[in-house]
Structures are given as C-alpha cells and as structure tokens.
Amino acid sequence: MIVGYSIFLFFRPQDKFDWSQIRPEVKDSVVMLQQNYLAYGPTGINFQFSKGYFTREWISSNMTVLEAKILVSYPTSAVRWLSIEHIYYNDNNYFNRLRPVLIKDSSYILIGGGGCVSSTFRVCDLVKRLSSQEILQ
C-alpha cells in the first residue's frame, strides 16, 4: 500500500504532457492554475479576486487557439474546461467537431462563483450548457 501511495504522489499524468507547442508563459500559468481553482468573480469572505481568477483571465486572453486545442487533452479538468471555452468562442467549427467527445467527459471541475460559494460541475454538463447557448443566440 505504501508503494502504491508513493507512486501516486510522484507520478502525475500532467508530468508526461507534451509542452513542445505551448509557450513557456502559458505553461507557467497553466501549472499555476492547477494549484488554484477556476474563479469567475470575487471569492472569499472579503469578495476579493483570487489568483485563480487572474490566472484564468490571463490564460483566456493570451492563449492561442492552437494552444487551446492542445490543452483540451490536458489531464486536469480545470485546464481542459478553460481550453474548451476558448475554442468555443474562437473556433466554433472545431468545437462542433469536438462536442461528441466532450459530452462523454464526466470529470468534475470546481468553479468559484461569488463569496464563499463554489460549485462543482461535470465538464460534459458545461459543454451541454454552451451548446444550448448556441441554439438560443
């Protein structure tokens, strides 16, 4: 059991991720995002913007579509979701081709909303919400 736990601690799928087509500044921000959660507004008791919020905003505005397409396969669901969002808003044709695969992604993601409240969503449910927004537009 100790050996299994040691392997779990030292082997992480993201360590084997191919970063060759990702710029170093985007890579650093993605690694930082793993240590936080996705925040879409002020969080905490004081309603302050967290590192997760600023990191998400920076990645969203600086990531290229090619980098987003590569990061969709990243092991951490928060990074995958950020990439999916980026693709949805910047390359809708690719999003539509990717949708059948994304609908099957049942991994969970923690999203900070406002105050002390955060929500847990499955990636597939968020993709369905994006898809329904497309129909309403």
Image (spheres, helix red, strand yellow):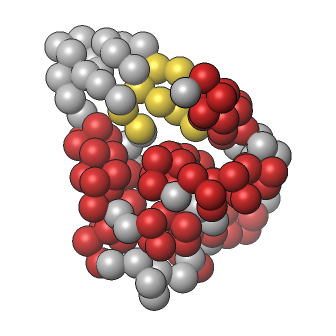
Q: On the rendered structure, is 4 left or right of 127? A: right
Q: On the rendered structure, is 36 left or right of 77? A: left
Q: Quadrant of residue 1?
A: bottom right
Find residue 9 and report its horizontal and vertical position in percent: 58, 62
Q: Residue at x 78, y 43 (%)?
A: 103
Nearer to the camera, 92 or 38: 92
Find residue 121 and report its horizontal and vertical position in percent: 62, 29
Image quarter in which the C terminus is found: top right
Q: Which residue lies most toward the bottom here?
A: 20
Q: Residue at x 38, y 67 (%)?
A: 64
Q: Residue at x 41, y 26 (%)?
A: 112
Is residue 120 at all visible to an observer of this figure?
A: no
Q: Residue at x 33, y 46 (%)?
A: 56
Q: On the rendered structure, is 108 left or right of 48? A: right
Nearer to the camera, 101 or 16: 101
Q: Is residue 95 above or below residue 15?
A: above
Find residue 119 and report its horizontal and vertical position in percent: 53, 21
Is residue 124 at all visible to an observer of this figure?
A: yes
Nearer to the camera, 36 or 136: 136
Q: Quadrant of residue 36?
A: top left
